[in-house]
Image (cartoon, helix red, strand yellow):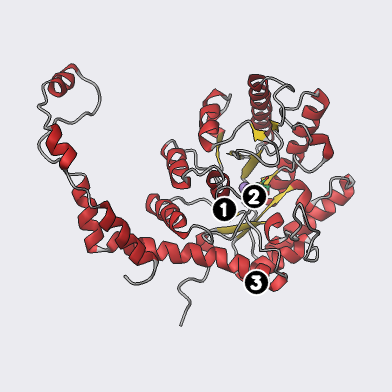
C-alpha cells in the first residue's frame, strides 16, 4: 500500500544545502559528519523525496573561487539539479560567516563593508537566477549589536533600507523577477539583532521603494526562542499578502539556537501552523531550515529529513481530520453566532455609529457565555495523540 505520508513534488518540500549538509559542529565541539559536496546533497535530497534545494552563495561557490570556477560550479550544479529532478526555489547570501561581517553587513559602520555586502548579495542573486530561483531570503544574522555605543539603531535601519532598495532595483534592472523574503531573529549570533520579529519587518517593508517586491520569511525557531506564537506571526504576514517563504524547524524556549527537526519539540504548535498554512492555501515552498542531531551520521541525516516531511504530512492529515470532526465543528460554528442581536461594526458610517451608540449591551450575558475551549482543546489533543 502507498505510504500516505510519503513526500510528493506538489508538497513543495525544500531543504537548504546547509541543513542536510550540516556537519554537527557546535560552539563546544568539532564536526561529526563528513563534508558532502553540493551534488552529493542533491542526490541525498532526491533519495529522501524532497522537491527543492536552497542555498547560500557560499554553500555552493567558495568565497574565494575565481570567476571561471564559479561558472563551472554553478553550471554543474544546475545540471545535477536537472538530472535529479530538484528545483532551486530560493537563494540567500551568506553575510555572517566571513570576519568582514563581524559588526554587520548592510548596517555596518564601515562603508567598505556595506559595499562588500551589497556586492555579495548581487552575486548571490546572479547565481540564483542561473538556477531558476525567484525567492531571495535575507537573514541579517550579524545586523545587530553587543554594545549600542557602536551606532544609532535608526541609522542601522536606514542603511538596511538603502541596501534592500538597491537590491530590488538590481533585480528589476536584470529582469530577475525576485521576491525578497526578510527573515527575523531576535538574537544569536549577535547579542541583539535589529529586526527581531516578523512584525518588525512588516513595519519596515512599507517604507521601501518597492514594497510589493518584499515580504517575510518567518522561522519557527526564531519565534519560539522568544516564547512567541509562530502561527500568529505567520497569520499577520499572510493577511497582508507578505508570506513569501517559510522556515520550518523547532526550538525549545530558553535554549541555544537548536534548529530541531520540524515538530519534534512542540508538535501542537506545529499542528496549528500546518493547519493554518493548509487552511489558507499557502502554495509557496515548505522549507526545512534545521539539521540532524550531532549524534547522527548520514543515515541519521536522512532520518532527519524524512522526519521533517513526514511530520508535516501527518499534521496535515490531522488538520483535515480536525476540519471534518462534527463535534469540533459544532463547537467552532457556535463561536461566531451572536449571543443576542447586535448591530455589525463594518465600515464607518454615521448610521452605523448611531446604531452602535444606541446598542443596548447585556454585559452580564456576554461575560457569562461559556466557550467550551477546554473541550475544544482536548478534542484537538485527542486527534493529535491518535485516539480520535
Ligand atoms: C542560518 C540561519 C537561518 C537562515 C539561513 C539563511 S542561515 O542557518 O540560522 O535561520 O534562514 O541565511
Ligand atoms: Mn532560517
Ligand atoms: Mn535559524
Residue indicated by mark 1: 251
Residue indicated by mark 3: 47
Secondary structure of residue under mark 2: loop
First along the sequence among labels 3 and 1: 3
Q: Residue 63 occupies which quadrant of the picture?
A: top right
Up-down: is 268 above or below 360? below
Q: CA distance from mark 1 to mark 2?
A: 7 Å
Q: CA distance from mark 3 to mark 1?
A: 27 Å
Q: Is mark 2 within 8 Å of ligand 3?
A: yes
Up-down: is 133 above or below 184? below
Mark 3 residue crowding within 10 angstroms, few (<14) / some (14–19) / many (20+): few
Contact? badges 1 and 2 (CB < 8 Å):
yes
Secondary structure of residue under mark 1: loop
Quadrant of the image containing the C terminus: bottom left
Q: CA distance from mark 3 to mark 2?
A: 28 Å
Nearer the observer, 205 or 376: 376
Contact? badges 3 and 1 (CB < 8 Å):
no
Amino acid at each position: 500500500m502507498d505510504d500516505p505520508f510519503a513526500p510528493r513534488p506538489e508538497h513543495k518540500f525544500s531543504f537548504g544545502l546547509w541543513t542536510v549538509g550540516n556537519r554537527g559542529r557546535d560552539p563546544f565541539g568539532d564536526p561529526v559528519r563528513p563534508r558532502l559536496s553540493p551534488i552529493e546533497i542533491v542526490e541525498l535530497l532526491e533519495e529522501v523525496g524532497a522537491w527543492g534545494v536552497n542555498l547560500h552563495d557560499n554553500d555552493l561557490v567558495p568565497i574565494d573561487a575565481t570567476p571561471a570556477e564559479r561558472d563551472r560550479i554553478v553550471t554543474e550544479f544546475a545540471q545535477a539539479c536537472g538530472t535529479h529532478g530538484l528545483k532551486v526555489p530560493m537563494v540567500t547570501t551568506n553575510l555572517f560567516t566571513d570576519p568582514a561581517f563581524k559588526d554587520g553587513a548592510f548596517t555596518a559602520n564601515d562603508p567598505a563593508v556595506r559595499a562588500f555586502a551589497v556586492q555579495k548579495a548581487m552575486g548571490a542573486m546572479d547565481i540564483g537566477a542561473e538556477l531558476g530561483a525567484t525567492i531571495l531570503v535575507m537573514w541579517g544574522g550579524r545586523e545587530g549589536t553587543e554594545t549600542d555605543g557602536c551606532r544609532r539603531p535608526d541609522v542601522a535601519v536606514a542603511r538596511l533600507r538603502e541596501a534592500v532598495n538597491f537590491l530590488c532595483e538590481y533585480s528589476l534592472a536584470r529582469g530577475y523577477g525576485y521576491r525578497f523574503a526578510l527573515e527575523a531573529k531576535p538574537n544569536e549570533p549577535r547579542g541583539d539583532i535589529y529586526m527581531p520579529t516578523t512584525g518588525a519587518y512588516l513595519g519596515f517593508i512599507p517604507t521601501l521603494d518597492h514594497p510589493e517586491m518584499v515580504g517575510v520569511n518567518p522561522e519557527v525557531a526564531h519565534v519560539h526562542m522568544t516564547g512567541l506564537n509562530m502561527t500568529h506571526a505567520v497569520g499577520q504576514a499572510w493577511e497582508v499578502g507578505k508570506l513569501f517563504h517559510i522556515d520550518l524547524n523547532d526550538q525549545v524556549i530558553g535554549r541555544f539556537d537548536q534548529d530541531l527537526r520540524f515538530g519534534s519539540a512542540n508538535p501542537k504548535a506545529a499542528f496549528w501552523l500546518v493547519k493554518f498554512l493548509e487552511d489558507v492555501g499557502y502554495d509557496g515552498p515548505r522549507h526545512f531550515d534545521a539539521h540532524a542531531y550531532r549524534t547522527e551520521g548520514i543515515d541519521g541525516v536522512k532520518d532527519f529529513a524524512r522526519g521533517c516531511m513526514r511530520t508535516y504530512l501527518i499534521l496535515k492529515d490531522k488538520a483535515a481530520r480536525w476540519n471534518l470532526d462534527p463535534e469540533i465543528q459544532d463547537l467552532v460554528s457556535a463561536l461566531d453566532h451572536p449571543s443576542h442581536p447586535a448591530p455589525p461594526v463594518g465600515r464607518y458610517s454615521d448610521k452605523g455609529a448611531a446604531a452602535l451608540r444606541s446598542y443596548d449591551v447585556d454585559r452580564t450575558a456576554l461575560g457569562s457565555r461559556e466557550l467550551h475551549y477546554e473541550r475544544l482543546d482536548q478534542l484537538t489533543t485527542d486527534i493529535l495523540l491518535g485516539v480520535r
